[in-house]
Image (cartoon, rainbow, N blue to C red):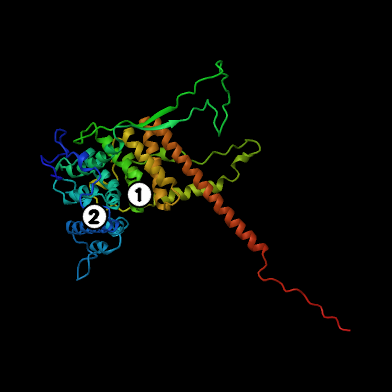
Amino acid sequence: MDFHLRGGSPSSSSDDHRYPNNNNNNSSIQPTNGHSSDPMHSWWESISKARSRIHLLSSILPPSDDGGTGGEEDPLSSLADTDRPARSLLISSAAYTSISAALSSPSSGSGEDPLCHWLYDTYLSSDPDLRLVVLSYLPLISSIYLHRIHHPNSDNPLSLSGFEAVLLALYSSETKARNGKPVTISIPDLTQPSLYHTPRNPNKPSNPNPKPSKPLIGVVSPPLEPQMAVKSTKRACIVGVALDCYYKQISQMPIWSKFDFCKFAARWAGQDCPCTSDFDRKPEHFIEKNNRFENETNVGLEEIEDEIEYVADRVGSLDIEVHNYSSSEVGEEDVRIPLPWELLQPVLRILGHCLLGPLNADEVKDAASMAVRRLYARASHDLVPQAILATRSLIQLDRRAREAANAAAAMVVSSASGSNANTPSKAKKPEILLVSK
């Protein structure tokens, strides 16, 4: 796969092959003509570039069954005629289905895959909406790539250099953006008073003029090193950084992209086990042997238990479209993959948004709830303390959010029924008494 650079095409079966260096290609495209300062020219140039990319994509994808026949216009090409073609391509469910079907084909991901060429070149463009289009397919690309890496087909091993080139393009872009610096957070020192709290046991300093304590800095991600190939020791880091790029733009991702990611994350965790329902078990009643007296704390738990059962049934009945995966890739067998912390950390960030984002659809929240529970079960079996803590926190936040939403809905219903009962249907006219003399 050339990807605009000379040299042998990379192969996923060997770590010695080299990938194109994206550090130079990922830089911001500098205007070289005299019309760079004209906003109208820049707008029209962006529209023209997006339309050309859509027409090229339409020629790459196989013809669909619904459109493009009988003299009808190709639904994918029709997106190029809109006012914002790149944004229309991003939010088109028909385009997502067609591209997902092509990416899921058994021959996808190779160095000669034209769709991988298109994704690679499109992400290197300067149009932010076109880059969002590529990011929206990252969950599917990551899922197929990781599955084929860890569950290869022994009869017909495939080259995955096309997928790896796209992942490296995202990784190189983030490496350049971080400029060799780590991602850090400032941890507050709770021993020092602030506007929001007072230390419980303040230490009285002997020095009347103490020096202020240094802020505690936590490293979320170490500095990134440029990578020319997807080596086995760096694979989790590269995919994790690419998912972190997806997380930064997750508010602009379409619902079906988030939906698929939750489904894939549940698959990565492995098969379901009883550990997923640790937080959904009904509390036992404390009954006295003589009087059979139930503890008063169980009052009101029936409604909560009914809601939990409803959510469990709803999550269990989810049927997420698999976009023509082969049977070996989407079967019910255990298809878990290794989940080191550098890969699991961005996965949990994305699931946290899907789980708690106020604008997310209920289907996305339910799918994220199932994925987080399966990851909690996986972390409990693997004995990963930080993963257990993170998944437990997400599960508890999800339960509290659902309980608060149910309580608010019940309060609205009760207040509405109460106001209707006390409000007269029709105002009475004042009575007028006629007195005859």
Instruction: Give the residue furthest to the bottom.
Output: 437
Taking the spot 24% from the left edge, 39% from the top edge, the residue there is: 172
Image-quadrant location for residue 394:
top left
Instruction: Give the residue furthest to the front.
Output: 34
Q: Quadrant of the C terminus?
A: bottom right
Instruction: Give the residue furthest to the right.
Output: 437
Q: How many marks?
A: 2
Q: Indicate the secondary structure of the residue bearing disc 2.
A: loop
Q: Tell me if I can see residue 361 in this picture.
A: yes
The spot of residue 198 in percent (x, y) is 57, 29
Q: Tell me if I can see residue 336 in this picture.
A: no
Taking the spot 48% from the left edge, 30% from the top edge, the residue there is: 188
Tell whether 360 sits left or right of 11: right
Image-quadrant location for residue 248:
top left
User: Which numbered disc, 1 or 2, marks the residue that appears first in the sequence?
Assistant: 2
380 shown above or below 312: above
The one nearer the camera, 102 or 157, is 102
> Distance of mark 1 from mark 2, alpha carbons?
39 Å
Image-quadrant location for residue 94:
bottom left
Q: Which residue is mark 2?
A: 35
- Mark whose residue sits in front, 1 or 2: 2
The spot of residue 193 in percent (x, y) is 55, 28
78 shown above or below 221: below
Q: Quadrant of the N terminus?
A: top left
385 shown above or below 270: above
Q: Which residue is mark 1?
A: 258
The spot of residue 253 in percent (x, y) is 34, 51
- The kind of residue on which mark 1 rests is Lys
The spot of residue 384 in percent (x, y) is 37, 30
- The kind of residue on which mark 2 rests is His
